[in-house]
Amino acid sequence: MFDKLKESILGIPEGETLGEVLKENGILGTVTGIIAVSLAMFHIITSYVGQLEAFKHRVTHLLVVIVLVFLTSLEKKYRSGDGRWRMKISMGLDVLFALAGVVCLIYTFTNSEALPLRAGSPTVMDLVMGSVAILLTIEASRRHVGLGIVVISVFFLFYVYAGPWFPGFLKHAPFTFGEIINIQYLDLEGLWGSPLGAAASFVIIFLIFAGLLMETGILETFMNFTMKLVGKSVGGPAKVAVVSSGLVGMVNGTAVGNALLTGQVSIPLMKKMGYKPAFAAAVEATASTGGQVMPPIMGSAAFIIAMFLGIPYAAVCKAAVLPAILWFFSIYVIVHLEAKKLGLQKLTDEDMTKLPTWKSLFQVSYLVFPMLLLIAVLMMGYSEVKAGFWGVVSLLLVASFRAESRFTLRGFFSGLRTAVEMTFSVTTACACAGIIVGCVMQSGLGYTLSTSLINIAGGKPFILLPLVMLASLILGTGMMTVGVYIIVSVLVVPAMISMGLHTLASHLFAFYFGILCNITPPVATAAYGAAGIAEASPWETGLISFFKLALPILCVPYVFIFQPGLLLEGSLFQILFTAAATFTAVFCFDVVVSGFLFKKCSLVERILFLVAGGLLITPSIGPTMAGAALFGLGFVFQKYFGREKMPNMV
């Protein structure tokens, strides 16, 4: 009796004791787990009863996360059993950094009321602790976000200090070391700014929801559902990658994580059906990157966009729906055409019999209810934090319906720890982005750069937009979604808004192009992760991802910047007309890059579809209708005239 209760409540299997579980985790693992679970519970409780004062709340979140970053690193190194002197030095640094984080947390939290009052005249200890907090944040970001955001953060800190030495419009008044720390540490303009505020309030509660949801096995359900839905169609395994990445992207915050989760199943299947390894990896990487524009999580950037613009989070999700669907629609069409062109096989009946039945999938469909409730609560106008809290509560209740999904204490704590570890990259990226924003504001670069871009463009949007696109792709190199968005929104979006372009569309424009860094060489993180699973060339995978799979959807941001109907704004006719024209245009571009529709396209046919797609995305009805006519002409000619289908042509 006791053993059954122990297994059903605590989650400890029969024949195993609590002492054995703790011994297996080790002292360090247990301590790290307790801190992680405590932080998660702190956020769950404060999301209901009310959060601490902004400075205290952000300090607590960031510095506890930083301590956990180094403790987790130390735990992994200790478990590796590597006794080399380099590893010992590395472990020693982890201990030092973790202790420094604890000291900084205690000092900053206990002085949280006095520090803002000392802004302008910091003490020596304030300067020391501020420097420590910034250095620890940058090092934690280097480990979990990448070198890109570290280089940019350090550059901007140097730029604020060395402004008088820079040429032209980059030159600004000098600032001392103390003045820099004053802005970054003693105020809510730098390290503790609004990016961290979003991570410590909205993002963390949604990630807790996602971590617990994944603990129920929902990802496997998504994969099985997708396999049953499209597995038997032409190019089935690739379509599985597309659809499952969209579903997983709804709850997963990173493109790389999405690719590694779904790619383990989809990539081997794609290779088995005849897709080349690099193409299989590219499909997974591009689809996983699309998960970053899929509401409700949107790589955690939706919360930041809402905070920056002062609009409801639900409004951001609503605007992102059609652009996100277009992303997956485009990849879906390309993999279908590619499979038809190469004459690839479908999944066999034997493969399909290994999957759960529709009845068994329906029996676990109740796990989707908390996601629907969360979205409904947001649409009803409740705050993001409250919606996240009720999402977590409903998940715990719904999961208890069946023994297979019911949370034990061990499973609950595991989900909370997973959620906190998911927030490592988001929190450190937001903190570094706060440093960058503080530097931009202190130096005045935001205004001068915006003015310079407008002058270069000569006030013409068709010149400015490609510049913003290139800036977003370059600034996003090697960074995760949140960091990319915050940097481009501060540096280049103001120029777009100053030119009179739609505010939300301008932010989504930069965000849409910023996330493409995940599949853009030379630092295509999602492509490289998928290439590892496929045993393919990372460089070739990145090139296919961007220049074949993502190329057709580059038109989408240009459409919604001039036609807000694609963001579900305007009359019903405007929305439907814009959506229909854009979907058709993307389809045309898919045919162009694939070189196939019903049979191999000739050069003339490709040009015809290219022109048709270009006309369809124009904001005028006349050219759009002309584009539709050209599309119809190309479609009919491909269907009924010309050469026969050539399945083995590449």
Image (cartoon, rainbow, N blue to C red):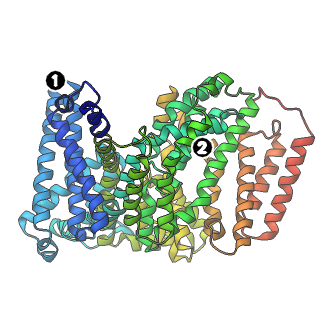
- In this view, which residue lies farthest toward the front? 1
* In front of the other: 302 or 128: 302
Q: Residue at x 65, y 39 (%)?
A: 229
Residue 522 in view, yes or no: no
Res 262 label: none
Give, as a three-letter code, the residue at label 1. Answer: Gly
Tell me the quadrant of the picture where the N terminus can be found. top left
Q: Where 30 sits versus 436, above or below?
A: above
Give percent across and percent down for residue 540: 55, 33
Give percent across and percent down for residue 356: 57, 32
Q: Where 96 sits versus 315, above or below?
A: above
Is residue 537 rendered to the left or right of residue 600? left
Q: Residue at x 32, y 37 (%)?
A: 8
Specify few, some or many for label 2: CA neighbours under 10 Å numbering under 14, 14-19, or 20 or more: many
Residue 354 in view, yes or no: yes
User: Which residue position holds label 2?
Assistant: 243
User: Which residue position holds label 1?
Assistant: 83
- In this view, which residue lies farthest toward the left? 124
